[in-house]
Amino acid sequence: MDEVISVDVAILGGGAAGLMCAMTAASRGRSVLVVERSNKLGKKILMSGGGRCNFTNLTTDPEHYLSDNAHFCISALRRYPPTSFIELVEAHKIPFEERKHGQLFCVRSASDILAMLSEECRDHGVKLRTRIEPQSLTSYDDQGGEGRTRYQLCCQSPDGRVIVRTESVVVATGALSIPTLGGSDQGYQFAEQFGLTLVPRLPGLVPFMATGQLKAFCEQLSGVSLPVTASCRDQSFTEDLLFTHRGLSGPSILQISSYWSPGETVVLDLLPGHSAKELLLEGKKSHPSQNLLSFLNAYLPRSLVALFLRETAGIASNPRLAEIRNAKLALLGDLLNGWQLKPAATEGYRTAEVTLGGVSTDDLNSKTMEARRQPGLFFVGEVVDVSGHLGGYNFQWAWASGFCAGQVV
C-alpha cells in the first residue's frame, strides 16, 4: 500500500542547500519533508575540505562565481552573507579557524556542520527521509478555491511507493560532480520537464590529465608540490600545484580548470612574484661559480629543476652560471615564468568538485530562486548555473540560495 504524505514543502536533496532551505522554511512554521536518494544526508559536506569542511569564505564578491549571468548571485549573497552562517556556527559552539584567502574550516570535523544542520531541522520539525528515490513530479491546479498550483511527487523507498502532496517543491539535488557522493542529473530532468532552460554542463574545479611527454614528466614528479601562478584566458590563480601520476592537480590547477577548454594552453609561472630572468642574471654576477641546479634549488624543488632543465629547457649538463651565456639565461628565465603546456583533458565529473552550468538563471527569480513561469517550483545550490571558486564559495552559495528559497516557500 502506498504511503501518502502531505506537507507544505517538499525538498529534493539532503545536502547543504536542501538542509538550509528546510530549516529556514520550518522555522517559519511550514511543514517540510526532505527526501534524499542516498543512504545518508550531507555526504558532500562530510568529505569537503579534507574532512574539515571549508564551510564559507569571508569574501563572497560576484567575481568569485561563474555564471552566464554574473549578477544573479548578488541578491542571495547579500541577503544571507557569510556572517549569518558564522553566527549560526558560533551559536552551536563549533570551533573553526581562518586559513589563507579568508577560508573558514572546522577545527574538529566536517561532521560538526552536518550535525548542526540536522539538529536545526529536527528542532523545527523537519521530516528527514533517506533512501527515497524521486521518480516523477507532476503539477495540478488546486480546485479547493485558492486556485494555487500544487504538486505530487512519486518516490520509491525500500518499503514501497511514497506519494508526497505539497504546495512547494525545492530542487536541491546537486549536480553531476562526484557521482559516488550522490551526484546525478535528476534536477536537470525536472527543470526541462517544466520548461526551464539548461546551460551546458561541464566539470569544474577538477585536475588535469596529461598524455605523451607531459604525462611522463608528471609521473616522474608525482607527489611534488610548489606554489605557482596558473593562467588561462584572462584568469590567473596563485596557489599550490601538485604533480600526479595522471597529470596536474592542486588548488591552482583546480581553480584554472573552470576556465579551461580542451585544446587551450595553460601557462604556469613557476616563480610567482619573481623575475626568473633577473634572478639568473643577478646570480651569475654574484655567484658565478655556483652550478645552475644548485642555484635554482634555492627556489624550486630539486627534482623539478633537474627534470625541467633537461626535458623543457634542453640543458642536459649542470653548468656553472658563469659558463652560460646571458641570452640563454634570459630564455630559461622566460620559460620558468611562462611554461606553456596543453592538458589532454580533465579528470571529469568523477573527481570534479563542482558542475559548471545548470538551470539557467534567466528562468529563476534571484531573490527567491523560484521558477519564473512555474509557481511553487524552486531550484537551489549546485543545480543552478552558479559555480564558485575553490575556498568555501560554493557552500556559501548553497547556504544563501537555500535560505532565500526557505524564506518564501
Image (cartoon, helix red, strand yellow):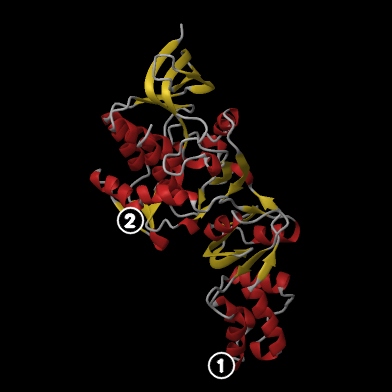
Q: Amino acid at mark 2?
A: Glu
Report how far apart the C-alphas of labels 2 and 1 lie in the structure. Answer: 43 Å
What residue appears at the point 38 percent right and 17 percent down from the top-left corner? Answer: 6
- Is 300 left or right of 84, judged from the image as shown? right
- Mark nearest the camera among 2 and 1 is 2
Work out whether 227 lies above or below 390.
Answer: below
Report crowding for label 1: few under 14, some 14 to 19, many 20 or more residues within 10 A (C-alpha). Answer: few
Q: Is residue 278 visible?
A: yes
- Across and down, in percent, residue 183 comes to 54, 36
| Vertical placement of residue 399 versus 218, above or below | above
Where residue 335 sits in the image (x, y, percent)? Answer: 67, 75
- Per the image, the residue denoted by label 2 is 97
Name the residue at 25% across, 43% down.
92
**Which disc number belongs to residue 406?**
none
Place of residue 170 in the rendered image (x, y in percent of width and height, measured from the top left)? 45, 31
Q: Is residue 274 left or right of residue 125?
A: right
Q: Is residue 400 left or right of residue 248?
A: left
Residue 213 or residue 263, whichever sits in front: 263
| Residue matched to label 1 | 286
Q: Is residue 119 visible?
A: no
Q: Earlier in the sequence, mark 2 or mark 1?
A: 2
Which element type, helix, strand or loop, lies under badge 2? strand
Quarter of image, res 165: top left
- Relative vertical location of residue 371 with respect to residue 73 in this rendering, above or below: above
Mark 2 crowdedness (10 Å alpha carbons): few <14, some 14-19, many ≥20: few
| Residue at far bottom of view | 285
Which quadrant of the figure contains the C terminus?
A: top left
Report x, y in % for residue 222. Answer: 61, 58
Q: Quadrant of residue 169?
A: top left
The structure residue drawn at horizontal position 60% and vertical position 80%, both measured from the top left corner, is: 276
Residue type at mark 1 is Ser
